[in-house]
Image (spheres, rainbow, N blue to C red):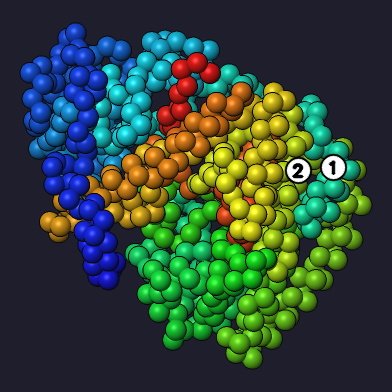
Amino acid sequence: MNKNLHIFICIFFSFTGLLSYGQKGDAENIDFSEETLMPVPDKNVSLNPDRIPSLKINYHKLKQYFNNFEPAYIENGSILFNDLYQNELDIDINSVTFSLKSKDSMIKLDLPISPESSQKLFVLNEKKYLDYYGGKDFMAAKINSYNALKFYDDKQIYSKKHYQLWDWKSLNHPPVRNLKYPLDFYDAHKKAIDYDTIQSLFFNPDIHRMIDKNTNSNLTFGNKLELLLNGDAYQKKLELIRNAQSSILISVMSYYKDSSSLFMTNELIKKANEGVQVYLIVEKVWTKLLMKKGMRPFKKSNVVVIYADDLLNNKKHHTALFHNKIFVFDDKVAIVGGQNIIDSDNISSGYNHQSRDSDLLIEGPAVTDIAHSFIDLLEDYHYEKKSETTQIAYIESFQRQMNDRYQFELENNLRGEAIYKDKLLNKNSRLDGVCRFVIQGPRTDRFAVSKAMISYFKYAQNSIDITSGKIKIDMDNKFEVNAYEGWSKRVWNELFSAAEDGIDINIINNGVDGGYGELSNYLKRKSLTNHHNKFIAKYYPRIAEKLDVKAAKRNYPALVYLQQKQNIDTWMYFQYMHSKTFMIDRFIVSVGSYNLDNWSADKSHEAILICQDKELAKTFEYQYTLDKVNSTPVILKNK
């Protein structure tokens, strides 16, 4: 592991007292009230009839427990053990033990393996869950189930009705991996729709012309799209790197030195040595402070590394965090989204206690806009100072090529407002890869993405579904004008206005399970992959637990504030939700780097793709519904 980071963690957490936090017991054994959190003994069999504080059980005892308790919605799953990197492990289930702790009603598998191995041992019967808790759909049943529980603000958890596996986190059931029934079984608002008969303001050419003007972007048509989730995005990026013939252009905030990023680094250096032009833009401050080692292998390579230094610019209108996540391969394929180059994203399944994240791959005329924007970034950061003569010549040639292609696309009815009427009023083209790319930064329009968000929220007619890694709301009018320009408040006000007009809004964010994000993910990951190190195995999970509670306490008031609003429901994903997406009226999907917080709205470089596409909408809506199923609700008793 990174020795310096290990030392830093030891010193920092010793100083802050977080190491001593865990010395009273395991991280999972926060001192909850037994009276309120202990499960009621089951009718048929009890794991712990004498309420012993801690004991060991085997798989057969655990299976007997779940097979016999009421309500009977937890059923036997599969026995398949893997490590965190999905390598299969040869483990006899009869040799496995589980630790049961009565204070927090948790059962933890006594093996340093992938959390999914534990999760898959049992599965949820959704119909039985719905029958038991009642409601118009599964999500209503889930709300009913949590409504009967107590929420502890100090620990940011709900009480429990029965013992459950630790790897389910805050869920009161095993995580669901696939939706077995139609979407409206889970969410009554998601009845099947006929995309050909949709009536929408987003088919109005004048509205899109207005958005063009506000955001300095335009619609492109006939793009091909693929939603990339979690670690699948990393694998696709590796594939595209290996297949690149001329250029690889990458901009990310974080490029951390770990196993997956080092593998990508080697692939990038290899392609650069083969003559492919490779440019990498990273955020300067955080890279120099925490990720410097990730850049070292590039120093003796042909990869050009550029540091975005806007965060150090003390001018009011130029200070900005470089938060873009953009990839362009040759001149044909681009990826825009929320994922950094870090194990937390790269090895994630969305279930293994790492990040839940999203990217969007695109082929078509929108790639021209994305490539143009990347060239602008290179020029903004004076790429020529880091480049050889041949590299400069290539970028200049590439820019001319993109200019020519832009004109070709205009002439061939692939972009531009002149064809909006024909394309948007035609049911065969209005939901076929219709996309706009919007980017903001201090050297262009630093609020372009915020303006796009406001425009799309303004013209929503039915629903807005959102995931956001961070949420910040000016609940008490405390944001200073000299620090922020007020665009965050404008975005939120537009959302609130939509809710007041009857638009159904759902927001999936983070509770204690998401907690402190990448830092907690790192600690959890290291505790599994370095379990032979006694310090790491003992203290890292405890520190992560403490950090998660601390982060959740900061986040929860905003979720409660939103939940109090009519027609807004907030949810907490059972892993770290890092994805930054929204869906309007079930057919417009946006994927990018923009969070619903003041930094994204007022200060950061951000980029998003917003698309009207039938197949993308179907894929996204399925995944969003699955994410809600694997989230816990923010409960207000008398909403």
> Is 85 located above or below residue 55 in the figure?
below
Q: Is residue 556 visible?
A: yes
Q: Position of residue 302 (x, y in %)?
A: 51, 84
Residue 26 found in image quarter: top left
444 or 185: which is nearer to us?
444
Q: Position of residue 225 (x, y in %)?
A: 64, 49
Q: Amino acid at mark 2?
A: Ser
Q: Which mark is residue 107?
A: none
Q: Is residue 348 visible?
A: no
83 or 307: which is nearer to us?
307
Q: Residue at x 34, y 64 (%)?
A: 259
Judged left or right of residue 324, residue 93 is left
Q: Residue at x 86, y 38 (%)?
A: 204
The N terminus: image quadrant: bottom left
11 or 421: which is nearer to us?
11
Q: Residue at x 84, y 42 (%)?
A: 207
Residue corresponding to mark 2: 455
Disc 1 crowd rating (10 Å Cα; few below 14, some 14-19, many 20+) is some
Q: Which mark is residue 207?
A: 1
Q: Position of residue 608 (x, y in %)?
A: 65, 53
Secondary structure under tag 1 reads helix
In the displayed orientation, state which residue is furthest to the bottom: 389
75 or 474: which is nearer to us?
474
Judged left or right of residue 250, residue 614 is right
